Image: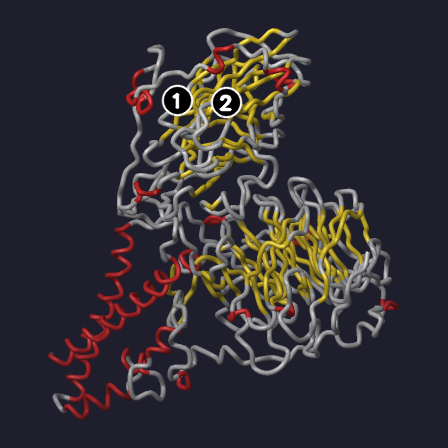
Amino acid sequence: MAGFINKVLLVFLILQNNCMCHESTSLLKRYQQSPWTLPSGCRKNRHPDISPNSPNFKLEVRMPGVTPVMSDSYFCTFVPVPPGQKSYIVDFKPHASMETAHHMLLFGCSMPATNEDYWDCGGRYGTCLDEAKIMYAWARNAPPTRLPADVGFRVGGNTDINYIVLQVHYGDVTAFRDNHKDCSGVTLQMTFLQQPLIAGIYLLLSDDTVIPPGEKVVNADIACLYKQTTIHPFAFRTHTHQLGQVVSGYRVRDGKWTLIGRQSPQLPQAFYHMENSMDIKYGDTITARCVFSGRGRTTVTRIGRTSKDEMCNLYIMYYMEAKHAKPYMYCMQEGSPELFKDIPPEANIPIPVSPAMAMHGHHTGKENPDENVILQQPKREEEVVLDQVSHLEEAIDWPGEKLKLGQVSGVALDSKNNLVIFHRGNHVWDENSFDQKHIYQPQGIGPIQYNTILTLDPVSVKVLNGVGSNIFYLPHGISTDKDDNFWVTDVALHQVFKLGPRGDYLLVLGQAFQPGSDSSHFCQPTDVAVDPAHGNVYVSDGYCNSRIIQFSPEGKFIMQWGEGSSLSGIPKPGQFFIPHSLTFVPVLGQLCVADRENGRIQCFIAQSGQFLREIQHPEFGERLFAVSYTPDNGGQLYAVNGEALVGKGVPVQGFVLNFTTGELLDIFKPIKQNFLMPHDIVAADDKTIYVGDVQANTVWKFVPAEKAEHRSVKKAGPGMEMHEIDATETFLEAEIEGKMRTPNVLEKHKSNNVLKQSSTAVSPVLITLLLIIPVVMLVGIGLFIHLRKSKIYGEDPDSKLESIQSSGGILGRLRGKSSRGLNLGNFFASHRGYSRKGFDRLSTEGSDQEKDDEEGTDSETEEYSAPPLPPTTSSS
C-alpha cells in the first residue's frame, strides 16, 4: 500500500509542479511592476462614469500614482473624452494640496505628446502634439470652479479636443521623502446636453520680465488689441511665484480702463468670479500688470519654469456664442509705457495676505463650505498591478483545411474586426520575377484572375466579401481606412491602389510596371498606412527605394523622408534597408516602420517625419518583417521576424512589446508546426492576433492563453476524443485551382459542431471541480492498477517494478520513451499554455510531442535566401 501512496503523491506533485510552472512563467512576464503602478487610493483614468439614464457624467483626470524624485518636475497624464459626439465640461473639482503640487493645468488636445501613463512634460515631451489649449488652472489650494448656467467647455466631436492632458508641477519634492504615490488631479463634471454658450480661456503672460535683486517694485505689463468676436468674461485667475504682489487685468475701450479682475497671487489661485458683467469686443485692448518685488533676493530673477523663477499670468475665463466659439486665445505682447501711464493706481497697491488666508483661501461665503476643504492625498506604500499582457497561443484548429490560399502577403482588419487577407492566388514571387532594373518579367501571364482580397468572419472563416480579381500581379501590403476602403500595394506593378469595399477603383498612385524614385513613381512599394484623423496616406517604398512618402487623402504628394543604410556599420536613425511594414499610432500621430533587413522598428512623427526612437531586441535577429499597434494596456506593438539570410539565426516567432518603453512582454509561435515565413501581422481589439505566412500559404491565429484553453473534452467512443471549441469547426473553402466560390454558394456550407458560450467567466465552483476530478480519476486509476497488479504479480517487488517500467501506465507515459528519469522538458512542453523558455532541448529525443523548433527551411519564393540588393538613395 505504501508503494501506491508514493505513486499517487508523485503524480500529484508532478501535476502541481506543472500548474505552478505554467503560472509562474506567466506571472514573471505579465505581472512585472511598472514605474507607474497605482496606489490603491488613486483612480485609474480612461473610463468616464456614464449612465445610460442621464446625460450628465464625471470624468476623472488623475496622476496614476507618481513619486517625483527631483524638485520642479513637470509630469503629465491624459484621458480621452467620450468619442463620437460633443460633450461639455461645466464644473472643475480639484484634488490636490499645495504641500504636494505647485500647480495643475488642464489642456485640451487633439493628441497628447505621448501615450504613456504619465511622462516628463518639462523635458523632451511637451503636453500636446498639436496646440495645447488651456482649459483650467489650479494652485495654492484653490477651491472648485463652477461655470455659469448654460456655459460649458466644448470637447469631442469635431472640436479638435479629443483628449484632456493634466500637467502637475511638483515644486518641492521634500514631501515625497516617504516615497508615497501622488494621485493629484481634477474631477470634471460633464454633460452631453448642448450648451448654448461656449467657454474659453484668454491667457495674458509675460516671457521677458527681469526682476533685479533687492528692487522694491517691478512692473510686468502686457497688452493686445482684441480682433475676434465678442467674448463675455465671467472669471479670472492670477498666477506668479513668491515675488508677485498683485496682478490686475483691464479692458481699455476708447481710453477708458475697466477692471476685469485684481487679486493677490499669494492667495489660493482659483478662478474668481467677476463682480460685474462686461464684454470685450473687436477693437478693445486687453491688458494685464503683474507687480513684483525683488526684496530678499541676491540674484536676478527671470521668467522661467522652476519655482525659484517667476511667472506673470492672468487667465480670463469667458463665454461666447457657440457659432463663433474659440476655446483658447493668448497675448504675450509687452504693453507700451504710453498706454500704461493711464492704468488705475489700484493696479500697484498690494493686497494684504495673512498666512491663514494664503494657506486656506479667502472666500466670500457664497460658496459651498464642503467645496473649500483642502483635499490631502493618501500616502500609501501598497500598490496594485496594472493590466498586463496575456501570453498568446495558437488557435490550433483555425482556420481548418478547407481554406485554400496563395502566398499570403498581407493581413488587415475592417471596422467590424473582420479579417482581410491579401494573397497572390496562383502567382508566386521567386528569383525569376524581376530583372536587374526591377522590371517584372512575366507580364504576359496577365493579372491574377481570382479574388485576391478576401474578407472573412474571424470565427467561422466564412467569406463575407471577395474583390480584387484581374487587377494585381504580385500583391504585397494591405490596410483599411475608417470607411473600410482597401489600400494595397503591388510590387510588380510598382503601384498603390485605393479600392472601395466592392472593389471599385478610387485612387491609383504610381505608373504600371515603371519603377522609379521620384514623387510619381515607386519601386516595389511594400505597405500603406492611413491617418484616421486627417486622412493622409503613408507609403513605404520599398525594396529598391528606402523612403516613406506622405500623400494627401486625394493622392497629392506632400513630402518624403528616409535614405538607404549601408551593408556594413550600424544603421542611423531614418535610414532603411527595406521598410517593409507600417503601423499608425492614432493617439499620438506616430508612424512606426518595420525596417526589415536592419531588424528593428523605427517610429516617427507622421506629419513631419521627425525620428523619435527605435526598438530593437536580440530576439528579433537580423530581420523584422512586420509590425502592428493596438492601444491595449497603454499601447502595444506586435511584430514578427524572419530567418537569417546566412547561418543559423534566432527562431522565427512573434513578439509583444510595450509601445512606450519598448519592453519585450511576450514571445509566441505556432504549436503544430513552425512559422515558415511570417510576412504580415495585425492585432484586433479583442487581443486576437493574425499572422500571414507567405510561404506556408496560410494565416495563423493567436489568442490569449485563457481563451485558447477555454474548451471542453467529451468522449466520442472507445479510443476517440471529440473537442468542442468556441468557434465553428467546419470552414469554407476559397479555391485557387479553379473559379472561386461566390458568397451565395459559400453560405450553403453550414457549421456542424458549434459550442456556444453565454459567458467567458468561470465560476470558482467549476474551477474546483475541474481540479478535483483529475485527481479523483488518477487516484481511481492508481488504485485499479495497484489492485490489478497485486492479483497478477502477488507481492514480488521485482515483478512490480518490471510491470511499472513496461506497462505504459501513468508514470511510464510521463517518463518518455527512452528516459531513465522523469522527462520534465517533454512533459511540460506537451501541455498547452506552457512557455518552453528554460526547458528547450531537455531530453527531447524521446518525445513525440515536440519537433526541433529551430529546424530551418530555405525559401525559394518571395524574400528568397539570396541577399537583397543594396538600397538606393531616394530622390524627389
**Residue 144's disc number:** 1
Residue 406 appearing in the image: no
In depth, the one of 218 and 189 nearer the eye is 218
Q: Earlier in the sequence, mark 2 or mark 1?
A: 1
Which part of the image, by quadrant, shows the C terminus? bottom right
Picture coordinates of residue 363, whole percent (x, y): 35, 15
In depth, the one of 235 and 269 nearer the eye is 269
Q: Is residue 699 left or right of residue 430?
A: left
Q: Is disc 1 placed on a helix, strand or loop?
A: loop
Picture coordinates of residue 630, whole percent (x, y): 54, 50
Residue 699 appearing in the image: yes
Look at mark 2 in the image and give the residue it sits on. Answer: 290
Which residue of the protein is positioned furthest toward the right in this rendering?
444
| Residue shown at the point (34%, 32%) measured from the top left | 98
Per the model, the C-alpha gap separating discs 2 and 1 is 24 Å
| Residue shown at the point (61%, 19%) measured from the top left | 337
Q: Is disc 2 placed on a helix, strand or loop?
A: strand
**Residue 370's disc number:** none
Picture coordinates of residue 240, whole percent (x, y): 45, 28
Q: For the residue marked with disc 1, what is the amino acid?
A: Pro
Q: Is residue 295 left or right of residue 200?
A: left
| Residue shown at the point (33%, 63%) measured from the top left | 23
Which part of the image, by quadrant, shows the N terminus? bottom left
For residue 22, which quarter of the picture? bottom left
In depth, the one of 272 and 70 nearer the eye is 70
Picture coordinates of residue 177, whole percent (x, y): 28, 46
Q: For the residue marked with disc 2, what is the amino acid?
A: Cys
For residue 93, which quarter of the picture? top left
Q: Is residue 542 left or right of residue 512?
A: left
In the image, which is nearer the foreground, mark 2 or mark 1?
Answer: 2
Q: For the residue carrying disc 1, how many other residues have a C-alpha within 10 Å: few (<14), some (14-19), or many (20+)?
A: many
